[in-house]
Image (cartoon, grey):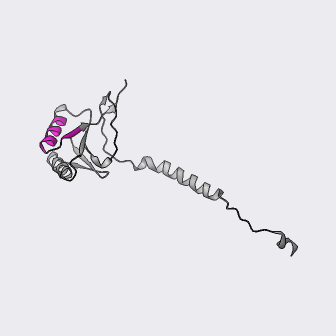
Amino acid sequence: MAKAARRKPMSEINVVPYIDVMLVLLVIFMVAAPLMTQGIKVQLPSAISDPISIEDPSQFLTVSITESGEYSLDVAGEESFLELTAVITAVAKVATSNPDLQVLIEGDAAVPYGVVITLMDQLQQAGIENVGLITQPGER
């Protein structure tokens, strides 16, 4: 009975289990994050230029051209292969609701120059004024 009277209630929280759980979650996310990246394999040409700053990702739309000449449109993180006319139609629909839309072309280095120019020309004929090219950063 004397021992029970001497004990005081413990008013401290033991945070060690919470730290362990957070470290386990951190490791899980670090391992899983690279697996979540998806995309079309494109070997981009390199160029010496300053990177653009993307303040609002909803203002950009990416059209990819693979080495085999297939077109891919990146909409909301999902990419699908389309014909050139379907890509132009889809981009034009998005541009009607977002007039400040900038289309970025991600062309493989092995794609002939004429294919990229044809895409740019078709986009401009569809009313897209802001067309840019994505490249790998080169050495200065």
Q: Nearer the viewer, residue 56 or 63?
A: 56
Residue 66, percent from left and from top? 25, 40
Extreme residue in the left direction:
125
**Residue at left offset 42%, top offset 49%:** 35
The N terminus lies in quadrant: bottom right
Which of the 4 image quarters holds residue 2? bottom right
Residue 7, percent from left and from top? 81, 69
Extreme residue in the right direction:
2
Q: Is residue 122 magenta?
A: yes
Which of the 4 image quarters holds residue 10? bottom right
**Magenta stretch mostly in which secondary structure?**
helix
The C terminus lies in quadrant: top left
The answer to whether residue 129 shows anywhere in this view is yes
Residue 137, percent from left and from top? 35, 31
Write the start and end of the magenta stretch as one range: 115-131
Q: Nearer the viewer, residue 139 or 56?
A: 56
Residue 117, percent from left and from top? 17, 35
Q: Is residue 133 magenta?
A: no
Extreme residue in the top direction:
140
**Residue at left offset 34%, top offset 39%:** 53
Describe residue 123's horizontal placement relative to residue 105 as left or right: left
Q: Nearer the viewer, residue 66 or 47?
A: 47
Describe residue 127's horizontal placement relative to residue 6 as left or right: left
The answer to whether residue 65 shows anywhere in this view is no
Extreme residue in the bottom direction:
1
**Residue at left offset 30%, top offset 44%:** 40
> How many marks can you see?
0
